[in-house]
Image: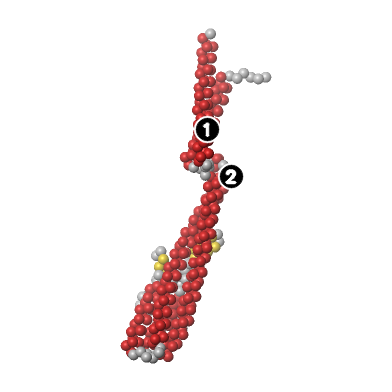
Amino acid sequence: MIGRITNEMTASMMLSGIESDLDQLDTTQQELSTGLTINEPSDNPSGTSLVLALNTTQSNLTSYSNNVSDGSGWSTAATSALSDMTNAVQRVQELVTEAANGTNNGGDMTDMANEVNQWIDEIKSDADTQYNGQYVFSGSATTTEPYQPGSDDTYAGNTGSVTREIGPGTSVAVNVGLSSVLGNGQTVSGQPGGDGLLLNTLRNVVDDMQSGNTSGLSTDLTDLNSNLNSLTALSTNVGAVTDRLQMASSRITSLQNSTTDTLSNTEDADMAATETQFSSEQAAFEAALQGGADIVQESLMNFLGSTSS
């Protein structure tokens, strides 16, 4: 048996339809306002999960990118300092070669020794290079000046590593073990005469120039060549780290772009289509309101007519 459709039922259906149209219109209007199709989890539960995962990935990539930038800064500072040291050692080689030929007088030898002392100070100054307020060549003791000014050549840092995470489970050491090349000078416990490393050799050069010891200078030149080779090898290692960081930067940038594209495809609204949809929904809503007004007016007239008869 089919029941009678009452005015109350008609009004209820009309209000339900208007509320549904209004909800959809509000949703579309929110998409236009935010530019996103997902403004709350209920809009698209599976899409919401993907967006959360992509945002986490993007946050991690940003962290890796910042680490790469910081590591590159360390490498750049180290490269510049090592280049200056290499130039200084090469100049000292020239002075030692000249001093070892036995044709210079005492004044000349003293002048050359004074210049070598200046180059020693310059090398130690380069060894105290900082990046972002941290000493590049102090190992993990980044707040400790590795080589104090003056005649004491003792290394004050440590051999710890400074690492930066540049990918999931992937870290790279960005500091440089310069003490393995510069050493601790002439006064080394248990090593009479020094450790044979660069600062030790340079101090020997000064002593032999001041004393006119040309045979000692020949030995110094051999040691200096060995020290320079070690310095060059260290510079090569820094270059390899720089290359690795550059490759990591390119990879991270590519992943960031890919993640951004996927995120955009998942949550960004098609603004042109959304504007068209909003216009259609707005027109439908206004029509529903008008239709509802007509129904209510007709029902009211019917009610008034029935009560007057």
Is residue 32 positioned above or below 182 on the image? above
Is residue 56 positioned above or below 270 on the image? below
Is residue 236 positioned above or below 214 on the image? above
Name which residue type carries label 2.
Ser
Q: Secondary structure at mark 2?
A: helix
Graded by Cα atoms within 10 Å as few (under 14), some (14 to 19) or many (20 or more), the crowding at tag 1 reads few
The structure residue drawn at horizontal position 50% and vertical position 28%, both measured from the top left corner, is: 286
> Residue under circle 1?
280
Q: Is residue 213 left or right of residue 272?
A: left
> Residue under circle 2?
46
In the rendered image, the residue lying farthest to the right is 1
Ranked by sequence position, the earlier of labels 2 and 1 is 2
Nearest to the observer: residue 250 or residue 156: 250
| Residue 191 seen in this snapshot | no
Q: Secondary structure at mark 1?
A: helix
Is residue 11 positioned above or below 56 on the image? above
Graded by Cα atoms within 10 Å as few (under 14), some (14 to 19) or many (20 or more), the crowding at tag 2 reads few
| Residue 114 seen in this snapshot | yes
Q: Position of residue 300 (x, y in %)?
A: 51, 17
Nearest to the observer: residue 251 or residue 147: 251
The structure residue drawn at horizontal position 48% and vertical position 42%, both measured from the top left corner, is: 34
Identify the disc placed on residue 73. Answer: none
Q: Position of residue 297 (x, y in %)?
A: 51, 18
Q: Position of residue 91 (x, y in %)?
A: 40, 80
Nearest to the observer: residue 253 or residue 66: 253
Quadrant assignment, res 127: bottom left
Name which residue type carries label 1.
Ser
What distance separates the C-alpha of mark 2 from that of mark 1? 27 Å
